[in-house]
Amino acid sequence: MSAADSSLLRPKLLGPATVNVVVAVSVLYTLLPVLWLVLASAKNRDALFSSDLLSLSDFSFLQNLKDLFAMDGGLYGRWYVNSLLYAVLGAAVGALVSVACGYAFDKYRFRHKEKLFGLVLAAVMVPQTVLALPLYLMASEAGLVNTFWAVFIPVLFNPFGVYLGRIFARGYVPDEVLEAARVDGAGELTTYARVALRMLGPGLITVFLFQLTAIWNNFFLPMVMLSDQDLYPVSLGLYQWNSSASVSPEYYPVVIMGSLLAVLPLILAFVLLQRFWRSGLTAGAVK
């Protein structure tokens, strides 16, 4: 085949039909586990392993839901509230901290600024599991092990959020606007809180969603820090129930139902905040 023929063939291989097939396969690959979760959550323990999931028989969705919140004295409800506190409150405070740090890196001059920011970028590449043991030792020295704060405090600081905060500050907050606020007599805190922070709204939402997803799915840090079941998040609690299911099969339906409910807050957050999410992702894309 000549070079001319291959050049004519290449656009056809990368045409709309090929792209649509790749997108359809990707969507199917993503949605199949969710579909299985929805169908399996409506089956009782016996039907879960013996019948066709697509069958409408052995429907026990409501019974599984009741069993979920009644299992082990209603522990799942406590775990769910814990996860909401860890994730929503932690993501909100963490987003504010990250964006403020990113704003400072972009708008202020101080010694070794770029070197410090280089350390932030290096910290992005450090896996969170590597930090679990040092964080445990520090929490142990402070007497925070097996407390709410042992999980909540570490999630407030996110190097990737600081990096995004600097990008958003550069893309959304013109220096001329800050200078105008200073000329009008506003201090640095007033300028940031009343001017810059409002312009950084899409950036805050984007960092918040990243933080929310990471904290909600956080598993290893709570497993290291916590031994009290009343402090478990949903991820760790469902893992414990799933480990017990091989001995007590009655845990299987509630684990599946609990997993289905566990994905709802993330879906709801992305649906409600997707408008800000889209605009935040394009920050700095157009000069």
Image (cartoon, rainbow, N blue to C red):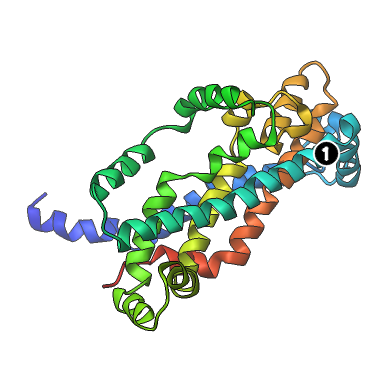
Q: Position of residue 148 (x, y in %)?
A: 69, 36
Q: Which residue is drawn at 85% across and 30% down?
A: 45
**Taking 107 as reference, is 24 left or right?**
right
Task: Give the residue drawn at x 66%, y 59%.
Answer: 268
Q: What element carries label 1?
A: loop
Q: Residue at x 79, y 32 (%)?
A: 230
Q: Is residue 233 left or right of residue 119?
A: right
Question: Which quarter of the rendered picture does the C terminus lie within?
Answer: bottom left
Q: What residue type is labelled 1?
A: Lys
Nearest the eye: 242 or 13: 242
Q: Where is residue 23 in the image (x, y as percent from the top left)?
A: 45, 55
Vertical arrangement, residue 83 with respect to residue 238, above or below: below
Q: Is residue 196 above or below residue 220?
A: below
Towards the viewer: 92 or 75: 92
Residue 216 appears in view: yes
Q: What number of labels is visible?
A: 1
Where residue 235 sits, quadrant-wise, is: top right
Residue 259: image x %, image y %?
71, 40
Left or right: where 41 falls relative to 124 = right
86 left or right of 51 in image:
left
In this view, the residue farthest toward the top is 247
What residue did someone put label 1 on?
43
Can residue 21 be seen at all in this image of the molecule?
Answer: no
For label 1, the crowd category at 10 Å Cα-Cα, with few meaning under 14, some 14 to 19 and many 20 or more, is: many
Position of residue 101 relative to residue 281, above or below, is above
Asked if residue 247 is positioned above or below residue 15 in the image, the reply reads above
Percent x, y for residue 68? 85, 38
